[in-house]
Image (cartoon, coloured by chain):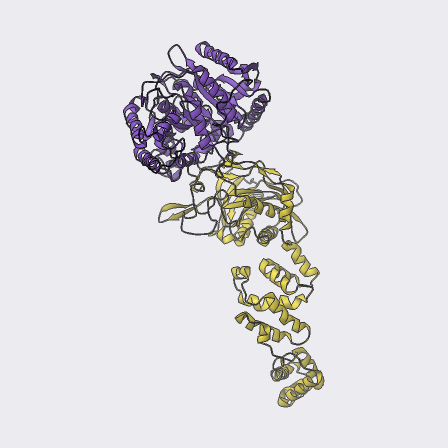
């Protein structure tokens, strides 16, 4: 997709301003149905597009991402552009600095169409905890786009952008990519700078691309990964992923942990089995093995993520920026209480309370400390698997997209759907979701591949081979449709 | 009434004088227009991340080494969560589980030691300013690096508490990690205090007095609190564990919060920062940069240079003064006259603590040394040294500009005898008084000799000779 648009620009089939206007018009038209964008940024977009056109006019050679229309999730800071985390708490907040990834993409000449919808502060699996309402699935408007990067997935799958950046703390890139039938890459923790990403759970958060193709994911990953002095936990990627993307995968060792398949039924199971067949046909070896500590992954994730969130979200007090209560108050304490009670939604409050509880004195050892220890065990076990396997294969989500308003009913039931995505975040590994079929309702199914730390090149290589062999792409009827489709 | 003993431990916050803040590149300069020494990181804007300034670690290690601490090869940062408007992230990045320095001590002059439990690094908060019924926040101080030095409850008297803080201040200034100005808040103490019957081993219930920012207030607060606790116990009650503040206007301690209201800081590992590794080689390299400790230095001045205790402590109190003094006497030169000139002529001019601390004077140590060499060689007398040095302080010019060849030479016995005889002849009344037993009258005759000798004569020698002549 990105290289197709790149060709169009370079061959002057259309100007970047024309291309950008196509997307802006489509976004204005179709966002009512999809609710993918929370903010459109036509001025920023057209200024960048004109700059691209000027470079073309001067005869300069364009980088792959130059002039490509894209989106940022609304928790990625953009100087002067409202960044809300889809929360009432940050409505009207305009950062005074740019996130590192946005700096990197600006340097490439990318065109920002707007900011995408998400679950409030990235907490949720459907984008429905957003103060702006949920994003819809372009393959079925009666279903959610997933979450928390639901807007990013909806915009890309609905052809309202060529690619988007999301963030993934427990599956928030991979799960909506799976639900919307596109590619979502969660990089190794520390491959991409988090500077400017509004934190949910700092030890788990990672920014990554949502794209139509694996090649696009590789191109965006190569552009945004790299060491950043401003993020001490970011050492950058080890190598570029594009050069080795199309290598033959014969002899690739794929491990399938049986714990990932417990309770996986019906269409999803069938799709997984087919994917394994495809890999065998490509010359990969598939072997089943066991990761016993995976059974702790979900509680470990919710304890650690909520603990960190309770601390990260303490700063929203109405004093310096963002929402402040409009009712009267007698003291600063009362003002902060009212502001936080009114500014945060239900799911955010639930996780702040949970996190505060597991860190409080008397409970710390039983919850937080125990979860930390178990995290160590999961890390050890998962990393050890890469002594025997190049890649692990699993479903991204045990099911396909939820019907609208499903997740609001039972939070614990909803948490359980993260079972296959959270281990990757706990262990800091790279993971990718790619389309591997459709269920009986024509909803996309996602295949998850997991790599060793900083082995994005191998991971994307394996994903590319499958993508080319299986060809599971189906366009959704929205947005900018080019001849030959978005996968061209 | 039983006799009670004080048991006290101190938690001292010392602001480090690194050029930039602990987690960003902003200046640490004191003051400035409110909110001008700030950036997205130190005001905790969403999405910002801290980045540890390694020189803070180095400064803290030097502080640890200077107070005899062990330095941890691995230490970590933690979050201390609490909500207050001067803390823009609603957590302070500190060290709780694995501090940088542990198990040190500071020796007291009475031979006892105050053990240091730990020293950790952390960030300072901003400041609330209450003005015209409104509250404003200044985040300039937010993110300035601090070390917190926590002692064991080893202090047994208010004098010991004062000496500990003074020694700590002296050491930190000497190694150049902090200016330790209590009035500017770059050294602040929390005092943990309890009392127990003398001879008892059991610790009493303690209270904590927060944020002492002067020695006087610290002493007064301790005195008040000690008596208050004794009164409670003597009255049959028991001391309640609580956090107090000292009210200097009424000279009392007041409750801030009780144990039940104590904050639950929900400490946990700071996920935005990586583990701090310190190699033994790095520690040794930092140890090599440490100057002689002021405590050792003072002892050396007394024991090896023969200076009085008071002079030694005054010289050592200001590092630049002691360094200047040592440059003057380098190579075993007579220390006493050098100390006299510095503590006399120079200190008379440098009236404030700041001026002494800065010790900004015109003559170089070499220039003072030249002057003192002439004294040592017997060429000139102390009174001429002093008057010449005053002029050197005024002008910065060398001693030779104020002392001529004539002045040097001094007076031989015969010349002095001649001047004495002249003085007696010129003042027969005084001479008669001395002969009649009024020895004080000799001062007038000495004055005559000194005037005639134009400063070259030694007053003591003249007096001795005059008395002999009038016997």
Residue B158 position (above or below residue B207): below
Tell me where residue A317 sits by quadrant. Answer: top left
Q: Nearer the viewer, residue B106 or B334?
A: B334
- Asked whether, in this view, residue B75 is left or right of residue B471, the answer is left
* Residue A106 rendering spot, x and y as whole percentages: 39, 36
* Residue B89 rendering spot, x and y as whole percentages: 45, 38
Tell me where residue B411 sits by quadrant. Answer: bottom right
Q: According to the colouring, which chain is yellow?
A: B
Q: Nearer the viewer, residue B273 or A251?
A: A251
Residue at x 65%, y 57% (from the top left corner): B297
* Residue B196 rendering spot, x and y as whole percentages: 62, 43
Q: So how many labels did they put on this image?
A: 0
Q: According to the colouring, which chain is purple?
A: A
Inspect this view and state whether residue A386 appears: yes
Q: Nearer the viewer, residue B90 or A90?
A: A90
Residue A414 position (above or below residue A64): above
Inspect this view and state whether residue B4 appears: no
* Residue B407 rendering spot, x and y as whole percentages: 62, 80
Tell me where residue A410 sits by quadrant. Answer: top left
- Asked whether, in this view, residue A57 is left or right of residue B81, the answer is left
Viewport quadrant of the C terminus of chain B: bottom right
């Amino acid at each position: 997709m990105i290289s197709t648009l790149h060709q169009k620009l370079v061959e002057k089939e259309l100007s970047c301003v024309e291309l950008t206007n196509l997307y802006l018009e489509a976004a204005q038209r179709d966002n009512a149905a999809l609710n993918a964008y929370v903010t459109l940024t036509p001025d920023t977009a057209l200024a960048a597009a004109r700059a691209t056109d000027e470079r073309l006019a001067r005869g300069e050679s364009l980088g792959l991402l130059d002039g490509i229309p894209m989106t940022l999730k609304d928790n990625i800071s953009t100087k002067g552009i409202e960044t809300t985390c889809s929360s009432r708490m940050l409505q009207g907040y305009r950062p005074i600095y740019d996130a590192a990834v946005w700096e990197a993409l600006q340097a490439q000449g990318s065109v920002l169409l707007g900011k995408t919808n998400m679950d409030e502060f990235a907490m949720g699996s459907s984008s429905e905890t957003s103060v702006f309402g949920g994003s819809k699935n372009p393959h079925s408007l009666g279903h959610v786009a997933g979450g928390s990067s639901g807007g990013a997935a909806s915009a890309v799958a609905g052809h309202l952008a060529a690619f988007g950046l999301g963030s993934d703390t427990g599956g928030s890139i991979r799960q909506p990519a799976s639900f919307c039938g596109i590619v979502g890459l969660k990089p190794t923790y520390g491959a991409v700078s988090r500077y400017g990403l509004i934190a949910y759970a700092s030890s788990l958060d990672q920014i990554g691309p949502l794209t139509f193709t694996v090649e696009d994911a590789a191109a965006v990953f190569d552009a945004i990964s790299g060491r950043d002095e401003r993020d001490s936990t970011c050492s950058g990627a080890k190598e570029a992923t594009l050069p080795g993307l199309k290598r033959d995968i014969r002899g690739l060792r794929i491990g399938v942990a049986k714990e990932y398949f417990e309770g996986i039924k019906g269409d999803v199971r069938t799709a997984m089995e087919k994917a394994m067949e495809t890999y065998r046909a490509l010359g990969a070896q598939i072997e089943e093995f066991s990761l016993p500590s995976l059974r702790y992954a979900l509680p470990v994730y919710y304890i650690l993520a909520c603990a960190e969130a309770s601390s990260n979200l303490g700063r929203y007090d109405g004093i310096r920026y963002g929402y402040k209560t409009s009712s009267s108050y007698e003291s600063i304490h009362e003002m902060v209480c009212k502001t936080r009670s009114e500014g945060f939604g239900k799911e955010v409050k639930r996780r702040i309370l949970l996190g505060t509880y597991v860190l409080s004195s008397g409970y710390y050892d039983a919850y937080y400390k125990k979860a930390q220890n178990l995290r160590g065990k999961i890390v050890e076990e998962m990393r050890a698997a890469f002594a025997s396997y190049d890649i692990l294969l699993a479903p991204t989500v045990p099911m396909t997209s939820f019907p609208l308003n499903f997740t609001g009913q039972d939070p614990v039931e909803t948490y359980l759907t993260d079972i296959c995505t959270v281990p990757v975040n706990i262990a800091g590994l790279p993971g990718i979701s790619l389309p591997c079929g459709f269920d009986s309702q024509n909803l996309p199914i996602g295949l998850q591949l997991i790599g060793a730390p900083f082995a994005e090149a191998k991971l994307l290589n394996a994903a590319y081979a499958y993508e080319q062999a299986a060809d599971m792409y189906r366009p959704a009827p929205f947005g900018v449709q080019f001849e030959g489709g978005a996968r061209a | 009434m039983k006799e009670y003993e004080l048991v006290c431990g101190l938690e001292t916050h010392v602001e480090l004088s690194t050029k930039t803040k602990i987690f960003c590149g902003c200046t640490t300069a004191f003051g400035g227009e409110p909110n001008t020494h700030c950036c997205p990181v130190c005001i905790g804007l969403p999405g910002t991340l801290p980045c540890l300034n390694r020189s803070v670690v180095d400064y803290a290690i030097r502080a640890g080494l200077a107070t005899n601490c062990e330095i941890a090869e691995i230490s970590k940062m933690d979050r201390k969560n609490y909500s207050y408007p001067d803390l823009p992230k609603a957590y302070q990045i500190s060290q709780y589980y694995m501090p940088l320095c542990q198990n040190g001590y500071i020796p007291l002059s009475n031979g006892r030691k105050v053990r240091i439990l730990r020293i950790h690094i952390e960030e300072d908060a901003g400041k609330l300013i209450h003005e015209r019924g409104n509250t404003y926040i200044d985040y300039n101080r937010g993110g300035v690096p601090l070390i917190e030095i926590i002692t064991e409850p080893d202090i047994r008297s208010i004098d010991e508490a004062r000496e500990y803080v003074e020694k700590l201040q002296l050491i930190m200034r000497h190694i150049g990690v902090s200016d330790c100005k209590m009035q500017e808040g770059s050294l602040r103490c929390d005092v943990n205090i309890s009392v127990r019957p003398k001879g008892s081993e059991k610790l009493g219930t303690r209270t904590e007095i927060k944020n002492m920012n002067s020695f006087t207030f610290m002493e007064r607060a301790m005195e008040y609190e000690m008596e208050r606790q004794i009164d409670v116990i003597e009255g049959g009650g028991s001391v309640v564990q609580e956090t107090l503040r000292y009210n200097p206007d009424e000279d009392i301690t007041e409750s801030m919060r009780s144990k039940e209201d104590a904050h639950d800081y929900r400490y946990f590992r700071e996920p935005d920062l990586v583990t701090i590794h310190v190699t033994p080689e790095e520690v040794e390299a930092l140890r090599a940069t440490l100057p002689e400790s002021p405590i050792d230095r003072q002892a050396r001045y007394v024991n090896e240079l023969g200076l009085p205790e008071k002079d030694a402590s005054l010289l050592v109190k200001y590092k630049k003064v002691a360094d200047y003094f040592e440059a003057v006497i380098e190579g075993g030169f007579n220390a006493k006259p050098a100390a006299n000139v510095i503590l006399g002529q120079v200190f008379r001019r440098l009236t404030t603590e700041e001026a002494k601390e800065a010790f900004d004077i015109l003559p170089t140590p070499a220039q003072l040394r030249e002057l003192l060499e002439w004294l040592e060689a017997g060429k000139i007398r102390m009174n001429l040294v002093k008057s010449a040095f005053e002029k050197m302080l005024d002008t910065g010019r060398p001693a030779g500009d104020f002392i001529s060849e004539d002045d040097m030479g001094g007076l031989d016995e015969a010349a002095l005898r001649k001047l004495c005889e002249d003085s007696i002849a010129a003042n027969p009344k005084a001479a008669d008084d001395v002969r009649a037993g009024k020895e004080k009258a000799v001062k007038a005759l000495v004055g005559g000799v000194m005037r005639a000798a134009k400063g070259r004569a030694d007053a003591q020698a003249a007096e001795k000779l005059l008395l002999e002549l009038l016997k």
